Image: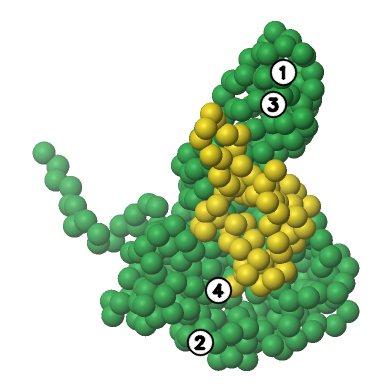
Amino acid sequence: MRSYSVNITKAKYLKPRAIGDEPSVNSAILATIDSTEMSIPLDPANRHYAEIMRQVAAGTLTIEDAD
Amino acid sequence: MALTKLRPAGQGFVNGNRNLFINGAMQMAQHGTSKAMAHDGNTSVYVVDRFTMAFGGTHEQLDGTYAQVADHPLSANGKSLKWTTGTAESSYDADEYLYVAQKIEAQNLQSINNGNSNAVPITLSFYVKSSVTGTFALGIYKEDSTTRIFNRTYAISSANTWEKKTITFAGDTSGGGIVNDNGAGFWINWHLAAGSNAKGGGSNGAWKNYGGLSDWADGQATNAIATTGGATWQLAQCQLEEGDVATQFENEDLGTTLRKCHRYFQKVFAGADNRYLAGTSPNIFWNATNTDNGGITFVETMRAAPSFSYNALKLRSPYAGDYTIGSLTANAITVNGLTTTTAGSSGSSNERVVYLAGTGTSSYYEIDAEL
């Protein structure tokens, strides 16, 4: 598969605020792509997510844990 | 009573909705009408909806502008897409390549029977104009199942003159076909330049299994677009249709084109200061945490869960004025909508009903599910 050529300078998981005792899980990634900050869903069909995962697998990008 | 002779259905008629491209008339440009590209900046950009331009490999000097322009082969007021080289690449290295593409969603290509013995040919027609003459490659790249590629070439004979090109691609009876899903079915690529490693693989003239970069732009004979400052390349009236005949370009009403484009990208402007943004829902600002949760409902179901970004937004209360947003993020993103969360906001100290609002004409949010 040909990759989507972008420059990703930051990636960090996002969690929604917990409601009551319900545990909060990662629901998106906040990333800076080509100088634009984006919230990116955890959907393999999303080209930004796919590229983040490709760069993570290649060892060129690390996703920070959510706050 | 006069009798009218009727032709049987399917014989001699040219039916509507034939164009497999979306926005082939280049009318929609939600992403903006012009964007700068640079070897050390943005190297993959959308301007005209559904048509992307990308630098491949590692360019060292190249930059330029990708734009929608009011220049058309037939209409006084029609649109085309245009690449203009700014700083030229001093020499074109082996790993470098440059192209414009539309990626067609797999579900929209099932009727061509790709990968089956009854695969049908498809015909591409378009107008092209360039300051550079020579032989250019264009082709089809298919990722699903066995990755396949088929390039052909066309010649630009006269500089700075619109020329119509028509090219038929035989149906591909091998390769396992196109998965019937929301992924990319075909990439239709117009190559503008290709280094020596990006051609020579034998994909020019017939379908073959993709063997790597050497198949990517096989047949491309000039790199002068990339190596000439001020060089231009334009594309208009693109149509891709089943069969081996190019029919008259299908003019589509703008509303239909926009609705199709919205499946892949939506950009919503506030329009002015204090105006609420369409699609957003009211929500409660919690002064205890300086946060709020809101929502956005999309105007069209997206191809996939989209990425979310925004520019120059604020929270506005009908009762207590404005809140400055510290950060705005999205979660629970689906093909139909998302939840927004603001944090670190400041303004009124009371809990209020608030809306996402603009601060001026440049305020917007956008959601992106392009292929």
Colour chosen for chain B: green
CA gap, disc 1 to disc 4? 48 Å
Q: What residue type is labelled 2?
A: Gly
Q: Name the residue under label 2.
A: B205
- Label 1 chain ID: B
Question: Which disc is residue B291 wearing?
Answer: 3
What secondary structure is marked by label 1? loop
Crowding near the residue tagged with mark 2, few <14, some 14–19, many ≥20 C-alpha atoms within 10 Å: some
Q: Mark 4 points at which residue?
A: A1
Question: Which disc is residue B287 wearing?
Answer: 1
Instruction: State which mark lies toward you, 3 or 4.
Output: 3
CA gap, disc 3 to disc 1? 7 Å
- Considering depth in this image, is B291 or B103 the residue closer to the camera? B291
Judging from the image, what is the letter of the chain drawn in yellow?
Answer: A
Crowding near the residue tagged with mark 4, few <14, some 14–19, many ≥20 C-alpha atoms within 10 Å: few
Residue A53 coordinates in the image, percent (x, y): 61, 63
Whether B38 is drawn above or below B26: the answer is: below
CA gap, disc 3 to disc 2? 59 Å
Q: Which residue is drawn at 80% across and 56% down?
A: B36
